[in-house]
Image (tube, rainbow, N blue to C red):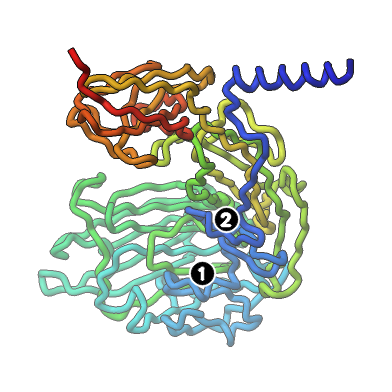
Amino acid sequence: MRNISHIRIIILSYIFFLTTGSIFGVGERSISIGGEDGWGRIERRQDIVEASMIRPNPVLVLSGRASTSANIDANLDAYLSFDEGTTGLFRDSQGNYDISIAPQITAVGLPWSMVGPGAALFTGGGSTVGSTDGLTLKPLEQAIFAQGNNVRDFSIEFWLYPHNLETGEQIFFWNSVRLNGRGTFDPQRIQANVSRNRLVWTFDHFFLSPGRERSQDISFSSPLLLNRTWSHHLIRFDADLGLLEYLVDGRLEVVEYMTSNGREGGEVFTPHIGRDPRIVLGGRFTGMIDEFRIHRLSSDSSRLTRYPSRGGRIQTHTIDLGRTNSRVNRVEAFGGRTGIPASSNFNQNVRNEYAGNGQLRFPDHSEISLFIRTSNHRYIWDDSWTPIISGAPLPPGLEGRYVQIAADFFPCGRGETSPYLSEIKVFFHTAEPPTPPSNIIAVARDGAVELSWRPNHSRNLGGYILYYGTASGEYFGDNGMQPSPIDVGNRTSIRIEGLRNGTLYYFAVAAYDMVTDPAMHPEPGDFSREVAARPLRMAE
Protein backbone atom coordinates (compact mmCIF):
# COMPACT_ATOMS: atom_id res chain seq x y z
CA MET A 1 0.00 0.00 0.00
CA ARG A 2 2.80 2.38 0.87
CA ASN A 3 4.43 1.85 -2.55
CA ILE A 4 1.08 2.47 -4.26
CA SER A 5 0.68 5.75 -2.32
CA HIS A 6 4.14 6.87 -3.37
CA ILE A 7 3.32 6.09 -6.98
CA ARG A 8 0.11 8.09 -6.70
CA ILE A 9 2.00 11.10 -5.31
CA ILE A 10 4.51 10.94 -8.15
CA ILE A 11 1.72 10.71 -10.73
CA LEU A 12 -0.23 13.61 -9.17
CA SER A 13 2.94 15.75 -9.04
CA TYR A 14 3.64 15.02 -12.66
CA ILE A 15 0.07 15.96 -13.64
CA PHE A 16 0.35 19.20 -11.60
CA PHE A 17 3.56 20.33 -13.27
CA LEU A 18 2.22 19.31 -16.67
CA THR A 19 -1.04 21.25 -16.33
CA THR A 20 0.48 24.31 -14.68
CA GLY A 21 3.23 24.55 -17.23
CA SER A 22 6.09 24.00 -14.77
CA ILE A 23 7.24 27.56 -15.44
CA PHE A 24 9.83 27.68 -12.65
CA GLY A 25 12.89 25.53 -12.25
CA VAL A 26 13.23 23.35 -9.20
CA GLY A 27 16.40 24.94 -7.83
CA GLU A 28 16.60 28.43 -6.36
CA ARG A 29 19.49 30.54 -7.64
CA SER A 30 21.08 33.72 -6.31
CA ILE A 31 23.10 36.71 -7.47
CA SER A 32 25.43 38.61 -5.13
CA ILE A 33 26.09 42.35 -5.35
CA GLY A 34 28.91 43.72 -3.21
CA GLY A 35 30.79 41.57 -0.70
CA GLU A 36 33.63 39.65 -2.31
CA ASP A 37 32.17 40.36 -5.77
CA GLY A 38 32.55 44.13 -5.41
CA TRP A 39 30.14 46.85 -6.50
CA GLY A 40 30.53 46.62 -10.27
CA ARG A 41 26.79 45.98 -10.68
CA ILE A 42 25.92 49.42 -9.30
CA GLU A 43 24.82 51.74 -12.11
CA ARG A 44 24.00 54.98 -10.25
CA ARG A 45 25.30 56.46 -7.01
CA GLN A 46 23.92 59.65 -5.51
CA ASP A 47 25.96 60.87 -2.53
CA ILE A 48 27.21 57.32 -1.95
CA VAL A 49 30.86 56.23 -1.83
CA GLU A 50 32.80 53.06 -1.08
CA ALA A 51 34.57 52.75 2.26
CA SER A 52 37.28 50.12 2.71
CA MET A 53 37.98 50.24 6.46
CA ILE A 54 34.63 49.27 7.95
CA ARG A 55 34.27 45.60 6.90
CA PRO A 56 36.68 43.09 5.32
CA ASN A 57 35.32 44.08 1.87
CA PRO A 58 34.41 47.60 0.69
CA VAL A 59 30.97 48.81 1.76
CA LEU A 60 28.68 51.56 0.46
CA VAL A 61 28.16 54.50 2.81
CA LEU A 62 26.88 58.07 2.60
CA SER A 63 29.50 60.52 1.37
CA GLY A 64 30.53 62.78 4.23
CA ARG A 65 30.37 66.57 4.22
CA ALA A 66 32.48 67.18 7.30
CA SER A 67 34.40 70.41 7.78
CA THR A 68 37.59 68.34 8.02
CA SER A 69 37.28 67.45 4.33
CA ALA A 70 36.19 70.89 3.11
CA ASN A 71 39.69 72.00 2.18
CA ILE A 72 39.87 69.44 -0.63
CA ASP A 73 36.62 70.59 -2.27
CA ALA A 74 37.59 71.86 -5.72
CA ASN A 75 34.58 74.19 -5.81
CA LEU A 76 35.54 76.09 -2.65
CA ASP A 77 36.92 79.57 -3.27
CA ALA A 78 37.38 80.45 0.41
CA TYR A 79 37.09 78.46 3.62
CA LEU A 80 37.64 79.70 7.17
CA SER A 81 36.92 77.01 9.76
CA PHE A 82 38.24 79.04 12.76
CA ASP A 83 39.40 75.72 14.25
CA GLU A 84 43.05 76.79 14.62
CA GLY A 85 42.60 77.74 18.29
CA THR A 86 44.06 81.25 18.07
CA THR A 87 43.34 84.24 15.83
CA GLY A 88 46.98 84.45 14.78
CA LEU A 89 46.51 81.17 12.91
CA PHE A 90 43.17 81.94 11.26
CA ARG A 91 43.54 81.42 7.52
CA ASP A 92 41.77 80.72 4.26
CA SER A 93 42.56 77.04 3.73
CA GLN A 94 42.10 77.49 -0.04
CA GLY A 95 44.88 80.10 -0.20
CA ASN A 96 42.85 82.51 -2.34
CA TYR A 97 42.53 85.33 0.21
CA ASP A 98 44.95 87.19 2.48
CA ILE A 99 43.52 87.76 5.97
CA SER A 100 43.99 90.56 8.49
CA ILE A 101 42.39 90.34 11.92
CA ALA A 102 41.45 93.21 14.24
CA PRO A 103 42.56 92.86 17.86
CA GLN A 104 38.94 92.81 19.07
CA ILE A 105 38.47 89.35 17.55
CA THR A 106 39.25 86.28 19.63
CA ALA A 107 39.05 82.53 19.18
CA VAL A 108 36.66 80.35 21.16
CA GLY A 109 36.51 76.59 21.41
CA LEU A 110 34.10 73.92 22.56
CA PRO A 111 31.35 74.01 23.64
CA TRP A 112 30.79 77.42 21.99
CA SER A 113 31.71 76.53 18.41
CA MET A 114 29.08 75.20 16.06
CA VAL A 115 31.18 72.90 13.88
CA GLY A 116 34.58 71.57 14.84
CA PRO A 117 36.63 72.73 17.82
CA GLY A 118 36.65 76.50 17.16
CA ALA A 119 34.79 79.65 16.12
CA ALA A 120 35.56 83.39 15.83
CA LEU A 121 34.25 85.74 18.54
CA PHE A 122 33.59 89.39 17.58
CA THR A 123 33.19 92.01 20.30
CA GLY A 124 31.66 95.14 18.78
CA GLY A 125 34.37 96.58 16.56
CA GLY A 126 33.99 99.83 14.67
CA SER A 127 31.03 102.13 14.30
CA THR A 128 31.21 103.02 10.60
CA VAL A 129 29.97 101.24 7.50
CA GLY A 130 32.63 98.91 6.15
CA SER A 131 34.74 99.21 9.28
CA THR A 132 37.99 97.26 9.09
CA ASP A 133 37.78 96.39 12.77
CA GLY A 134 36.53 92.96 11.80
CA LEU A 135 38.19 90.17 9.85
CA THR A 136 39.24 91.39 6.40
CA LEU A 137 39.75 89.15 3.37
CA LYS A 138 41.72 90.56 0.43
CA PRO A 139 41.24 88.46 -2.74
CA LEU A 140 44.33 87.27 -4.58
CA GLU A 141 44.45 87.00 -8.35
CA GLN A 142 42.96 83.49 -8.45
CA ALA A 143 40.00 84.29 -6.15
CA ILE A 144 36.49 84.41 -7.61
CA PHE A 145 36.00 87.98 -6.29
CA ALA A 146 39.37 89.25 -7.58
CA GLN A 147 39.50 92.59 -9.38
CA GLY A 148 38.25 92.48 -12.99
CA ASN A 149 36.61 89.06 -12.74
CA ASN A 150 33.35 88.26 -14.48
CA VAL A 151 31.59 86.10 -11.91
CA ARG A 152 29.02 83.48 -12.77
CA ASP A 153 27.71 81.00 -10.17
CA PHE A 154 28.69 81.64 -6.56
CA SER A 155 27.55 80.95 -2.99
CA ILE A 156 28.35 82.57 0.37
CA GLU A 157 27.55 80.76 3.62
CA PHE A 158 28.33 80.91 7.32
CA TRP A 159 27.01 80.05 10.77
CA LEU A 160 25.95 83.04 12.89
CA TYR A 161 25.57 83.36 16.68
CA PRO A 162 24.45 86.93 17.58
CA HIS A 163 24.78 88.08 21.16
CA ASN A 164 22.62 91.21 21.14
CA LEU A 165 21.03 91.56 17.67
CA GLU A 166 21.27 95.33 17.88
CA THR A 167 20.02 97.31 14.92
CA GLY A 168 22.96 98.57 12.88
CA GLU A 169 25.28 95.65 13.56
CA GLN A 170 27.15 94.64 10.41
CA ILE A 171 27.84 90.95 9.81
CA PHE A 172 29.13 90.89 6.23
CA PHE A 173 30.46 93.66 4.00
CA TRP A 174 31.95 93.39 0.50
CA ASN A 175 32.83 96.43 -1.54
CA SER A 176 34.75 97.68 -4.55
CA VAL A 177 34.39 100.57 -7.02
CA ARG A 178 33.77 100.37 -10.77
CA LEU A 179 34.09 102.94 -13.53
CA ASN A 180 30.72 103.55 -15.17
CA GLY A 181 29.96 104.79 -18.67
CA ARG A 182 29.73 108.39 -17.48
CA GLY A 183 33.36 108.50 -16.42
CA THR A 184 32.56 108.38 -12.70
CA PHE A 185 32.84 105.61 -10.14
CA ASP A 186 29.98 103.60 -8.63
CA PRO A 187 30.47 101.89 -5.25
CA GLN A 188 29.76 98.16 -5.44
CA ARG A 189 28.52 96.67 -2.19
CA ILE A 190 27.08 93.57 -0.57
CA GLN A 191 25.98 94.20 3.00
CA ALA A 192 24.32 92.08 5.68
CA ASN A 193 23.22 94.32 8.58
CA VAL A 194 20.94 93.72 11.55
CA SER A 195 17.63 95.57 11.62
CA ARG A 196 14.82 94.76 14.07
CA ASN A 197 16.09 91.25 14.79
CA ARG A 198 16.48 90.41 11.11
CA LEU A 199 19.50 90.17 8.85
CA VAL A 200 19.00 92.59 5.94
CA TRP A 201 20.97 91.94 2.73
CA THR A 202 21.56 94.64 0.12
CA PHE A 203 23.29 94.37 -3.29
CA ASP A 204 24.28 97.71 -4.85
CA HIS A 205 25.78 97.99 -8.37
CA PHE A 206 26.76 94.31 -8.08
CA PHE A 207 24.59 92.61 -10.70
CA LEU A 208 25.28 94.24 -14.08
CA SER A 209 23.67 93.92 -17.51
CA PRO A 210 25.75 92.24 -20.25
CA GLY A 211 26.89 95.65 -21.49
CA ARG A 212 27.53 96.81 -17.89
CA GLU A 213 25.55 99.98 -18.47
CA ARG A 214 22.81 99.06 -15.98
CA SER A 215 22.70 97.40 -12.56
CA GLN A 216 20.00 95.44 -10.76
CA ASP A 217 20.00 96.48 -7.10
CA ILE A 218 18.08 94.51 -4.51
CA SER A 219 17.42 94.24 -0.78
CA PHE A 220 15.78 91.48 1.29
CA SER A 221 15.79 90.19 4.86
CA SER A 222 15.89 87.00 6.88
CA PRO A 223 13.11 85.77 9.15
CA LEU A 224 13.32 86.80 12.81
CA LEU A 225 16.57 85.63 14.40
CA LEU A 226 17.09 84.63 18.02
CA ASN A 227 19.80 85.93 20.31
CA ARG A 228 22.42 83.42 21.40
CA THR A 229 21.22 80.80 18.93
CA TRP A 230 23.16 79.43 15.97
CA SER A 231 21.62 79.90 12.51
CA HIS A 232 22.99 79.00 9.10
CA HIS A 233 22.87 81.55 6.23
CA LEU A 234 23.41 80.78 2.56
CA ILE A 235 23.30 83.18 -0.42
CA ARG A 236 23.56 81.46 -3.80
CA PHE A 237 23.39 82.63 -7.42
CA ASP A 238 22.75 80.60 -10.60
CA ALA A 239 24.03 82.58 -13.61
CA ASP A 240 22.23 80.42 -16.17
CA LEU A 241 18.85 81.44 -14.76
CA GLY A 242 19.80 84.69 -13.08
CA LEU A 243 18.40 83.12 -9.89
CA LEU A 244 19.41 84.56 -6.51
CA GLU A 245 18.28 82.60 -3.44
CA TYR A 246 18.62 83.07 0.30
CA LEU A 247 18.33 80.11 2.67
CA VAL A 248 18.28 80.22 6.47
CA ASP A 249 18.81 76.92 8.31
CA GLY A 250 18.25 75.12 5.03
CA ARG A 251 14.85 76.74 4.38
CA LEU A 252 14.38 78.78 1.23
CA GLU A 253 13.36 82.29 2.34
CA VAL A 254 13.98 84.52 -0.70
CA VAL A 255 13.85 83.89 -4.47
CA GLU A 256 14.76 86.75 -6.83
CA TYR A 257 15.68 86.90 -10.51
CA MET A 258 18.55 89.20 -11.45
CA THR A 259 17.18 89.72 -14.95
CA SER A 260 15.98 92.59 -17.11
CA ASN A 261 12.33 91.80 -16.35
CA GLY A 262 12.77 90.42 -12.83
CA ARG A 263 11.49 87.02 -13.96
CA GLU A 264 12.85 83.82 -15.38
CA GLY A 265 13.69 84.13 -19.06
CA GLY A 266 14.84 87.74 -19.03
CA GLU A 267 18.32 89.03 -19.87
CA VAL A 268 20.58 87.89 -17.02
CA PHE A 269 22.58 90.39 -14.95
CA THR A 270 25.85 89.00 -13.56
CA PRO A 271 28.61 90.40 -11.31
CA HIS A 272 31.69 92.14 -12.67
CA ILE A 273 34.25 92.91 -9.94
CA GLY A 274 35.57 96.46 -9.77
CA ARG A 275 38.73 97.90 -8.25
CA ASP A 276 40.22 97.12 -4.84
CA PRO A 277 37.65 94.54 -3.65
CA ARG A 278 37.62 93.32 -0.05
CA ILE A 279 35.39 91.41 2.37
CA VAL A 280 34.94 92.33 6.04
CA LEU A 281 33.35 89.89 8.50
CA GLY A 282 31.96 91.26 11.77
CA GLY A 283 33.13 94.85 11.32
CA ARG A 284 30.37 95.99 13.68
CA PHE A 285 29.10 92.88 15.44
CA THR A 286 29.02 91.18 18.82
CA GLY A 287 28.73 87.41 18.60
CA MET A 288 30.31 84.46 16.82
CA ILE A 289 30.79 83.33 13.22
CA ASP A 290 31.78 79.81 12.24
CA GLU A 291 32.49 77.91 9.00
CA PHE A 292 32.66 80.79 6.52
CA ARG A 293 32.75 79.61 2.91
CA ILE A 294 32.61 80.99 -0.61
CA HIS A 295 31.79 78.51 -3.38
CA ARG A 296 32.39 78.75 -7.12
CA LEU A 297 28.93 77.32 -7.78
CA SER A 298 25.31 77.65 -6.72
CA SER A 299 25.69 75.37 -3.70
CA ASP A 300 23.08 73.18 -2.07
CA SER A 301 21.99 74.27 1.37
CA SER A 302 24.76 73.04 3.65
CA ARG A 303 23.76 72.18 7.21
CA LEU A 304 27.43 71.43 7.83
CA THR A 305 26.67 68.03 9.25
CA ARG A 306 28.87 65.05 8.50
CA TYR A 307 26.24 63.40 6.32
CA PRO A 308 23.63 65.20 4.16
CA SER A 309 20.14 65.05 5.62
CA ARG A 310 18.63 64.20 2.23
CA GLY A 311 20.55 60.92 2.27
CA GLY A 312 21.75 59.08 -0.81
CA ARG A 313 20.66 56.41 -3.28
CA ILE A 314 22.09 53.56 -5.32
CA GLN A 315 20.59 51.69 -8.27
CA THR A 316 21.91 48.51 -9.85
CA HIS A 317 22.44 47.80 -13.49
CA THR A 318 19.76 45.71 -15.20
CA ILE A 319 20.21 42.14 -13.97
CA ASP A 320 19.29 39.37 -16.44
CA LEU A 321 17.64 36.37 -14.75
CA GLY A 322 17.80 34.28 -17.94
CA ARG A 323 14.22 33.91 -19.19
CA THR A 324 10.92 35.69 -19.50
CA ASN A 325 8.64 35.58 -16.43
CA SER A 326 11.35 34.51 -14.01
CA ARG A 327 10.42 35.14 -10.39
CA VAL A 328 12.37 36.95 -7.66
CA ASN A 329 11.70 35.24 -4.33
CA ARG A 330 13.41 37.60 -1.88
CA VAL A 331 16.23 40.12 -1.51
CA GLU A 332 18.60 40.10 1.45
CA ALA A 333 20.65 43.13 2.48
CA PHE A 334 23.63 43.00 4.83
CA GLY A 335 25.20 45.96 6.59
CA GLY A 336 25.23 48.17 9.66
CA ARG A 337 25.93 51.77 10.66
CA THR A 338 29.05 53.82 11.19
CA GLY A 339 30.07 57.28 12.35
CA ILE A 340 33.24 59.27 12.90
CA PRO A 341 33.56 61.83 15.70
CA ALA A 342 33.93 65.33 14.26
CA SER A 343 37.16 65.93 16.18
CA SER A 344 39.00 62.93 14.79
CA ASN A 345 40.30 62.07 11.35
CA PHE A 346 38.81 59.38 9.13
CA ASN A 347 41.23 56.66 10.15
CA GLN A 348 40.71 56.91 13.90
CA ASN A 349 37.91 56.23 16.38
CA VAL A 350 35.51 54.79 13.80
CA ARG A 351 32.24 53.72 15.40
CA ASN A 352 31.06 50.60 13.60
CA GLU A 353 28.01 48.47 14.33
CA TYR A 354 27.38 45.42 12.15
CA ALA A 355 23.73 44.41 11.98
CA GLY A 356 24.06 41.61 9.42
CA ASN A 357 20.97 40.75 7.39
CA GLY A 358 17.87 42.58 8.53
CA GLN A 359 15.81 45.75 8.35
CA LEU A 360 18.87 47.99 8.70
CA ARG A 361 16.94 50.51 10.80
CA PHE A 362 18.63 51.84 13.90
CA PRO A 363 17.45 53.61 17.09
CA ASP A 364 19.03 56.91 15.99
CA HIS A 365 16.79 56.83 12.85
CA SER A 366 19.57 56.03 10.39
CA GLU A 367 18.34 53.39 7.95
CA ILE A 368 18.47 51.78 4.50
CA SER A 369 15.26 51.25 2.51
CA LEU A 370 15.17 48.71 -0.34
CA PHE A 371 13.20 48.80 -3.61
CA ILE A 372 12.79 46.50 -6.62
CA ARG A 373 11.31 46.60 -10.11
CA THR A 374 11.00 43.87 -12.75
CA SER A 375 10.33 43.75 -16.47
CA ASN A 376 10.32 41.31 -19.35
CA HIS A 377 11.97 43.95 -21.55
CA ARG A 378 15.50 45.19 -20.89
CA TYR A 379 14.78 48.80 -21.82
CA ILE A 380 11.11 49.23 -20.94
CA TRP A 381 10.21 49.90 -17.29
CA ASP A 382 7.07 51.35 -15.77
CA ASP A 383 9.19 53.42 -13.32
CA SER A 384 7.26 52.09 -10.33
CA TRP A 385 9.58 50.86 -7.60
CA THR A 386 8.13 48.41 -5.07
CA PRO A 387 9.39 48.80 -1.49
CA ILE A 388 10.59 45.51 -0.02
CA ILE A 389 11.82 44.18 3.32
CA SER A 390 15.17 42.46 3.52
CA GLY A 391 14.77 38.67 3.72
CA ALA A 392 10.96 38.71 3.45
CA PRO A 393 9.06 36.96 0.61
CA LEU A 394 8.23 39.40 -2.16
CA PRO A 395 4.64 40.30 -3.05
CA PRO A 396 3.06 38.61 -6.10
CA GLY A 397 3.45 40.11 -9.54
CA LEU A 398 7.22 40.67 -9.39
CA GLU A 399 8.04 38.46 -12.35
CA GLY A 400 10.19 39.22 -15.35
CA ARG A 401 13.44 38.42 -17.05
CA TYR A 402 15.09 41.65 -15.87
CA VAL A 403 15.34 43.12 -12.39
CA GLN A 404 16.82 46.23 -10.75
CA ILE A 405 17.43 46.87 -7.06
CA ALA A 406 17.60 50.34 -5.47
CA ALA A 407 18.45 51.41 -1.92
CA ASP A 408 17.94 54.72 -0.14
CA PHE A 409 20.43 55.62 2.61
CA PHE A 410 19.40 57.99 5.42
CA PRO A 411 21.69 59.32 8.20
CA CYS A 412 20.64 59.73 11.80
CA GLY A 413 18.67 62.82 12.78
CA ARG A 414 21.81 64.73 13.78
CA GLY A 415 23.75 63.70 10.67
CA GLU A 416 26.53 62.05 12.67
CA THR A 417 26.09 58.39 11.70
CA SER A 418 25.42 56.69 8.39
CA PRO A 419 24.09 53.24 7.55
CA TYR A 420 26.31 51.14 5.33
CA LEU A 421 25.62 48.32 2.91
CA SER A 422 28.06 45.43 2.68
CA GLU A 423 26.21 43.06 0.33
CA ILE A 424 22.91 42.43 -1.49
CA LYS A 425 21.73 38.95 -2.45
CA VAL A 426 18.91 38.37 -4.94
CA PHE A 427 17.26 34.94 -4.74
CA PHE A 428 15.17 33.86 -7.74
CA HIS A 429 13.79 31.01 -9.83
CA THR A 430 14.46 31.10 -13.55
CA ALA A 431 11.35 30.32 -15.58
CA GLU A 432 11.62 27.05 -17.46
CA PRO A 433 10.90 27.23 -21.21
CA PRO A 434 7.74 25.44 -22.42
CA THR A 435 8.33 21.85 -23.40
CA PRO A 436 8.50 21.18 -27.16
CA PRO A 437 5.49 19.58 -28.81
CA SER A 438 5.51 15.83 -29.42
CA ASN A 439 4.40 13.42 -32.15
CA ILE A 440 5.61 15.60 -35.05
CA ILE A 441 4.36 14.26 -38.38
CA ALA A 442 5.60 15.45 -41.80
CA VAL A 443 3.74 14.43 -44.98
CA ALA A 444 5.33 15.17 -48.37
CA ARG A 445 3.18 16.69 -51.12
CA ASP A 446 3.81 18.10 -54.59
CA GLY A 447 6.07 21.15 -53.89
CA ALA A 448 4.91 21.23 -50.31
CA VAL A 449 5.05 19.50 -46.92
CA GLU A 450 2.21 19.25 -44.41
CA LEU A 451 3.20 19.15 -40.74
CA SER A 452 1.16 18.49 -37.59
CA TRP A 453 1.94 17.86 -33.92
CA ARG A 454 0.33 17.18 -30.60
CA PRO A 455 -0.55 20.38 -28.67
CA ASN A 456 1.45 21.51 -25.65
CA HIS A 457 -0.74 22.00 -22.55
CA SER A 458 1.46 24.55 -20.79
CA ARG A 459 -0.71 27.24 -19.15
CA ASN A 460 1.76 29.94 -20.26
CA LEU A 461 1.93 28.81 -23.89
CA GLY A 462 2.05 31.62 -26.42
CA GLY A 463 2.36 29.54 -29.61
CA TYR A 464 4.75 27.56 -31.79
CA ILE A 465 7.63 28.33 -34.12
CA LEU A 466 8.47 26.04 -37.03
CA TYR A 467 12.05 25.73 -38.32
CA TYR A 468 13.10 24.09 -41.59
CA GLY A 469 16.11 23.72 -43.84
CA THR A 470 17.87 21.41 -46.26
CA ALA A 471 20.48 20.10 -43.78
CA SER A 472 19.89 18.32 -40.50
CA GLY A 473 20.01 20.79 -37.59
CA GLU A 474 20.50 23.79 -39.93
CA TYR A 475 17.15 25.49 -40.37
CA PHE A 476 17.80 28.28 -42.87
CA GLY A 477 15.15 27.39 -45.40
CA ASP A 478 13.56 30.05 -47.61
CA ASN A 479 10.88 29.27 -50.17
CA GLY A 480 10.43 32.90 -51.11
CA MET A 481 7.15 33.11 -49.19
CA GLN A 482 7.72 31.60 -45.74
CA PRO A 483 11.37 31.85 -44.68
CA SER A 484 12.43 29.89 -41.62
CA PRO A 485 11.53 30.30 -38.80
CA ILE A 486 7.74 30.62 -39.10
CA ASP A 487 5.57 31.83 -36.22
CA VAL A 488 2.63 29.44 -36.40
CA GLY A 489 0.72 30.94 -33.48
CA ASN A 490 -1.47 28.54 -31.54
CA ARG A 491 -2.14 26.28 -34.52
CA THR A 492 -0.89 22.70 -34.42
CA SER A 493 -0.53 22.18 -38.17
CA ILE A 494 0.85 24.04 -41.18
CA ARG A 495 1.36 23.47 -44.90
CA ILE A 496 4.57 24.91 -46.38
CA GLU A 497 4.31 25.61 -50.10
CA GLY A 498 6.93 26.52 -52.70
CA LEU A 499 9.41 23.76 -51.83
CA ARG A 500 11.61 22.08 -54.45
CA ASN A 501 10.52 18.61 -55.45
CA GLY A 502 13.20 16.01 -54.89
CA THR A 503 14.91 17.97 -52.11
CA LEU A 504 14.94 16.52 -48.62
CA TYR A 505 13.78 19.04 -45.98
CA TYR A 506 14.26 18.81 -42.23
CA PHE A 507 11.77 20.23 -39.73
CA ALA A 508 11.58 20.99 -35.98
CA VAL A 509 9.03 22.80 -33.83
CA ALA A 510 9.53 24.79 -30.60
CA ALA A 511 6.95 26.27 -28.23
CA TYR A 512 7.24 29.78 -26.80
CA ASP A 513 5.91 31.58 -23.74
CA MET A 514 3.02 33.99 -23.86
CA VAL A 515 4.14 37.65 -23.97
CA THR A 516 1.89 40.66 -23.37
CA ASP A 517 4.37 43.33 -24.44
CA PRO A 518 4.11 43.98 -28.20
CA ALA A 519 7.72 45.18 -28.20
CA MET A 520 8.94 41.73 -27.17
CA HIS A 521 9.69 38.87 -29.53
CA PRO A 522 8.66 35.30 -28.70
CA GLU A 523 11.23 33.41 -26.64
CA PRO A 524 11.12 29.78 -27.85
CA GLY A 525 12.13 26.75 -25.85
CA ASP A 526 13.90 23.61 -27.01
CA PHE A 527 13.45 22.02 -30.43
CA SER A 528 11.17 19.06 -30.86
CA ARG A 529 12.31 15.83 -32.41
CA GLU A 530 13.48 16.50 -35.97
CA VAL A 531 11.47 15.05 -38.86
CA ALA A 532 12.21 15.02 -42.60
CA ALA A 533 10.20 14.87 -45.82
CA ARG A 534 10.97 15.07 -49.58
CA PRO A 535 8.36 16.81 -51.75
CA LEU A 536 7.63 14.87 -54.98
CA ARG A 537 5.40 15.33 -57.94
CA MET A 538 2.73 12.68 -57.68
CA ALA A 539 1.60 10.53 -60.64
CA GLU A 540 -1.75 11.60 -62.05
Task: Write the residue at 26% across / 45% down.
Answer: 264
Give the tally of numbered discs.
Answer: 2
Q: Is residue 10 left or right of residue 432?
A: right
Instruction: Point out which mark residue 424 bears.
Output: none
Q: What residue did someone put label 1 on?
A: 292
Task: Write the residue at 43% across / 61% down.
Answer: 192
Task: Write the residue at 44% across / 69% down.
Answer: 294
Q: What residue did someone put label 2 on?
A: 308
* Disc nearest the viewer among 1 and 2: 2
Q: Quadrant of residue 506?
A: top left
Q: Position of residue 224 (x, y in %)?
A: 53, 48
| Mark 1 to mark 2 CA distance (whole Å) | 18 Å
Q: Quadrant of the N terminus?
A: top right
Q: Is residue 232 visible?
A: no
Q: Quadrant of residue 475?
A: top left
Task: Write the residue at 34% across / 74% down.
Answer: 145
Tell me the crowding category of disc 1: few under 14, some 14 to 19, or many 20 or more residues within 10 angstroms, Cα based: some
Q: Residue furthest front?
A: 539
Q: Label 1 amino acid?
A: Phe
Q: Is residue 376 left or right of residue 35?
A: left
Q: Is residue 406 left or right of residue 180?
A: right
Q: Label 2 amino acid?
A: Pro
Q: Quadrant of the C terminus?
A: top left
The answer to whether 152 is drawn above or below residue 99 in the figure is: above
Tell me the crowding category of disc 2: few under 14, some 14 to 19, or many 20 or more residues within 10 angstroms, Cα based: many
Q: Position of residue 46 (x, y in %)?
A: 50, 54
In this rendered view, identify the residue nearer to me: 374 or 253.
Answer: 374
